[in-house]
Every structure is written in structure tokens, then in C-alpha cells.
Image: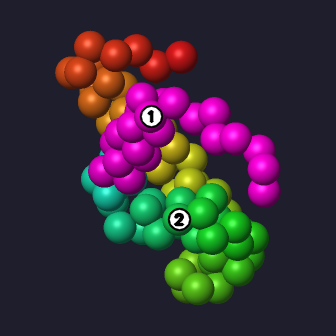
């Protein structure tokens, strides 16, 4: 591959910091919310598959994901506000 790497080292550090903040925020979620979020958003499983793994209904999975996203947004807003950064 002869394409030069144009990623600035500062950009890479920002990405790593943002990923670390996101993972820390996910880790703060209640267990069931975290599990549903990880299975559907990171492992890319369908709601039915996630429901089967978790032993709950697909509707319950939807509720957990919605609550997880709401709680994740709140946690990220707190983190970024403490650091003087702003979410877009």
C-alpha cells in the first residue's frame, strides 16, 4: 500500500481519548443495559438474538437499549462538561 498516512498524531490521540471516554461511560451503565447495548451495537446481533441470549423478550431488549442510550448520553455530557469540552 503506497498511500501515505495523513493522520496527524494529535488526531490519533483525540480518537484514543474519545474511545476511552466512551468505554468508561459504557462501563457505568447497569449490567443489563450494558449487555444489551454491547450485543446489539458492538456485536451487531439482532434484537431477537440478544433477547434469546439474555433470556428476555425482544421488547425488553428495545427498552434496555433506549435506557442505555439515554444514560450514556447523560454520562458523556457530564464527562465532557467537566473537561470543558462540548458535545455536538
Left or right, 55 with reference to 27:
right
Vertically, is 50 above or below 79?
below
Quadrant in the picture for residue 4: top right
The picture places residue 34, in percent across and down from the top left corner, at 43, 62
> Does residue 44 appear anywhere in the picture?
yes
Question: For the magenta stretch, what is the residue range?
Answer: 1-24
Towards the viewer: 16 or 46: 16
Left or right, 9 with reference to 49:
left
Left or right, 42 with reference to 19:
right
- Between disc 1 and disc 2, the foreground one is 1
Towards the viewer: 12 or 74: 12
- Residue 57 part of the magenta segment: no
- Residue 71's label in the rendered image is none
- Residue 12 part of the magenta segment: yes
The picture places residue 70, in percent across and down from the top left corner, at 47, 38
Quadrant in the picture for residue 29: bottom left
Give the residue at x 70% y 72%: 45
Towards the viewer: 66 or 85: 85
The secondary element bearing badge 2 is classed as helix
* Mark 1 and mark 2: Cα distance apart in space: 29 Å
**What's the magenta bit mostly, secondary-structure-wise?**
helix
Quick one: quadrant of the N terminus? bottom right
The picture places residue 11, in percent across and down from the top left corner, at 48, 31
> Does residue 71 appear anywhere in the picture?
no
- Residue 38's label in the rendered image is 2
Vertically, is 71 above or below 2?
above
Q: Mark 1 sits on what residue?
A: 9
Amino acid at each position: 500500500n503506497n498511500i501515505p498516512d495523513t493522520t496527524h498524531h494529535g488526531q490519533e490521540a483525540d480518537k484514543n481519548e474519545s474511545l476511552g471516554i466512551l468505554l468508561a461511560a459504557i462501563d457505568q451503565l447497569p449490567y443489563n443495559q450494558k449487555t444489551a447495548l454491547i450485543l446489539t451495537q458492538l456485536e451487531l446481533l439482532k434484537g431477537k438474538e440478544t433477547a434469546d441470549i439474555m433470556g428476555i423478550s425482544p421488547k425488553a431488549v428495545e427498552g434496555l437499549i433506549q435506557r442505555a442510550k439515554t444514560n450514556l448520553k447523560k454520562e458523556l455530557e457530564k464527562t465532557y462538561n467537566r473537561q470543558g469540552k462540548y458535545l455536538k
